[in-house]
Amino acid sequence: MCIHFEEAVVLGRGTRLFAGAMIVVCSVLVGPSAPGGALVARSLPVEAVREVVPNRVMTWNICNPCEESNVDRAAEIAAYAPQVIGLQEACVGDVERIRDYLESLYGLVYHVEYGMVLRNWGRCGGVPWSPGAFGQAVLSAAPMTDRVNVEYPDGGSEDRGYMAVTTTVGGRLVRVFNTHLVQRRQEAVRADQTGVLAAEVARHDRAILLGDFNAVPEASELSGIWALAADTDPQCRPASTGTCKPTTDWQSKFDYIFLRGLVPLEHRVHPTSYSDHHLLHADLDPT
C-alpha cells in the first residue's frame, strides 16, 4: 500500500523519512501519476542524493501562480544541493512542502527564513480571511541570524521588497540578500528600489545578492548595484561587450547572483520546465 506524503508529514520526522522512502518505492511500482492524480516523487539517481555543497548558492524564481508540483521543484533543487537557496514568488506553504521533500526524499536539511510582502488568496490559497503569505524565502543548510524584511517604499504595481540574513557559505559568515524587483516598464520604480537595496548592501564587506531584478544587465536602474558588486559570471558585465547567459524563457537575463568581497569559481544556468525562470547557481571561493 502506498503512503501519501502530505498525510504522513504531520506524524513527525521519522515518519516523514519512512513516507519519503515509500513514495520512491511506489513510483517504481505504479509509474508516474496522471495529471491531477496521486502525487508521485520524481526521484534522483542514488549518486545525486548527497550532502549540500558548502560553497554553492542558488537563486530561483519558482513562478507563482504556476500550479507546479512542489515535489518536482524539490527534485530540481536537490540535483545541485546548494548551501544557500534564494526563492522568489514563493508562498509559505509551498516553501514548507519543498523543504520537507528535500529532507524526506534526499536527506537535505535546511533552515528557512521568510521575507513576505503580501497576503494573497489568489496566489497562495488559504481562506479569504486568512490568505497565504507571498514573497521571498531563503533556505540555508547552516543556521541564519539577524533576519530583516524590508518592503520598498514604492512597490510599483505590486508590493515588493528584500530580505537579508547572515549565514555561512564555504565556512565563512556572509550577509545574504534576496530580492524581487517590480516587473515590466517600471524602470523608475526599480531604480528607487535598487537605491534602497544598494544603501544596505554597502554596509557589508562580504555580501551575496540573489534575486529576480526584472532588468537586463545594461539597464540603468542596476547601475547602483554594479557599482558595489560583480555578477558571479565573469563574462557578464553591464557594458554591451559583456556576454550574459539568459535566465528566462524569453531569453533575457533577469536573475542574478551578485558578489561583494567574494570570488566566484563556477557559474551555471539550468533551464527547467517548472518555471519561466531558470535555476542559477554559483560555487564560490571559500578562502
Image: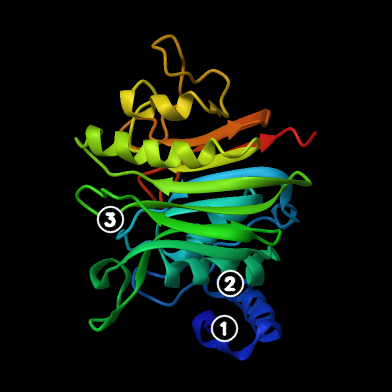
Q: Which mark is residue 9?
A: 1
Which residue is drawn at the image coordinates 49% and 63% (left, top)?
A: 114
* 2 vs 3, front mark: 3
| Residue 163 against residue 8 in the figure, above or below | above
Q: Position of residue 185 (x, y in %)?
A: 19, 35
> Disc 2 or 3, which lies upstream in sequence?
2
| Residue 247 against residue 4 in the figure, above or below | above
Q: Quadrant of the C terminus?
A: top right
Q: Are marks 1 and 2 in contact (CB under 8 Å)?
A: yes
Which amino acid lies under the numbered mark 2 shown in the image of this protein?
Asp
Which amino acid lies under the numbered mark 1 shown in the image of this protein?
Val
Instruction: Using the image as rendered, state which of residue 212 and residue 147 is in the foreground.
Output: 147
Q: Quadrant of the N terminus?
A: bottom right
Which residue is drawn at the image coordinates 58% and 20% (left, top)?
A: 234
Q: Position of residue 160 (x, y in %)?
A: 32, 52
- Mark 3 = which residue? 159
Residue 287 seen from this side: yes
Instruction: Using the image as rendered, state which of residue 186 and residue 212 is in the foreground.
Output: 186
- Mark 2 = which residue? 100
